[in-house]
């Protein structure tokens, strides 16, 4: 058995990826940002309020109930038009999710530019299960007579 002491290396500096050119490090976050901007542009210029412009929601077509995503495209369209209240009325979950995506992509871009690894937000199980519980309550409530204010417009 080897009795050589093992010493952990810790410099206190943030972990950096192996040196790659900037354009290679920036590629994935720029693609994600481009997909997000492209989605916003598509939903801005092709109005989802026009019936049949994007087809039917499969959940609503099959079961006749609103899923948590119903009204999401209309909410993004309203958001890109600057109508925030209308966006919230179409789907109250869209505005926080779009903001979270934007913060995540900007952080990813900054970290890639610095040569650092991208990071996922640390979520403990209580937060994850609370989110899914909130999603279930939201779905049930928007399909009841008491939750008509949550139905997509």
Image (spheres, helix red, strand yellow):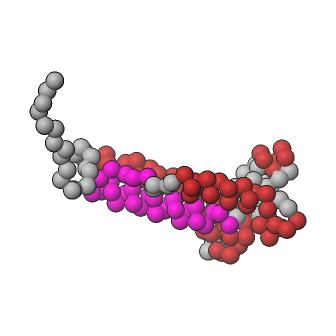
Left or right: 125, with 67 as reference point: left
At 30% from the left and 56% from the top, the residue drawn is 113
On the question of residue 62 being in view, the answer is yes
Image coordinates of residue 101 in percent, x first then y, are 51, 59
At 32% from the left and 54% from the top, the residue drawn is 112
Left or right: 71, with 13 as reference point: right
Question: Which quadrant would the C terminus be assigned to in this image?
Answer: bottom right
At 45% from the left and 59% from the top, the residue drawn is 104
Q: Please state the total of marks drawn on the protein image.
A: 0
Image coordinates of residue 108 in percent, x first then y, are 39, 56
At 18% from the left and 53% from the top, the residue drawn is 11
Image coordinates of residue 69 in percent, x first then y, are 70, 55
On the question of residue 47 being in view, the answer is no
Q: Within the magenta stretch, is there residue 63?
A: no
Q: Residue furthest right?
A: 145
Q: Residue furthest left?
A: 4
Left or right: 118, with 95 as reference point: left
Q: Nearer the viewer, residue 44 or 97?
A: 97
Q: Is residue 28 above or below residue 137?
A: above
Q: Within the magenta stretch, is there residue 104?
A: yes
> Magenta region, mostly helix, strand or loop?
helix
Q: Residue furthest top?
A: 1
Point out the stretch of residues depicted in magenta.
92-120
Question: Which quadrant would the N terminus be assigned to in this image?
Answer: top left
């Amino acid at each position: 058995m080897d009795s050589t002491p093992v010493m952990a290396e810790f410099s206190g500096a943030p972990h950096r990826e192996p040196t790659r050119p900037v354009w290679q490090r920036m590629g994935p976050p720029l693609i994600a940002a481009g997909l997000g901007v492209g989605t916003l542009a598509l939903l801005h210029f092709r109005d989802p309020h026009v019936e049949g412009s994007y087809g039917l929601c499969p959940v609503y077509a099959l079961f006749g109930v609103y899923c948590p995503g119903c009204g999401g495209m209309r909410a993004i369209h309203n958001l890109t038009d600057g109508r925030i209240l209308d966006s919230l009325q179409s789907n109250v979950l869209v505005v926080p999710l779009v903001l979270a995506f934007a913060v995540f992509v900007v952080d990813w871009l900054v970290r890639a530019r610095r040569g650092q690894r991208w990071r996922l937000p640390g979520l403990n199980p209580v937060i994850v299960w609370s989110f899914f519980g909130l999603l279930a309550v939201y779905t049930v409530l928007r399909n009841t007579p008491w939750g008509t204010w949550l139905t997509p417009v």
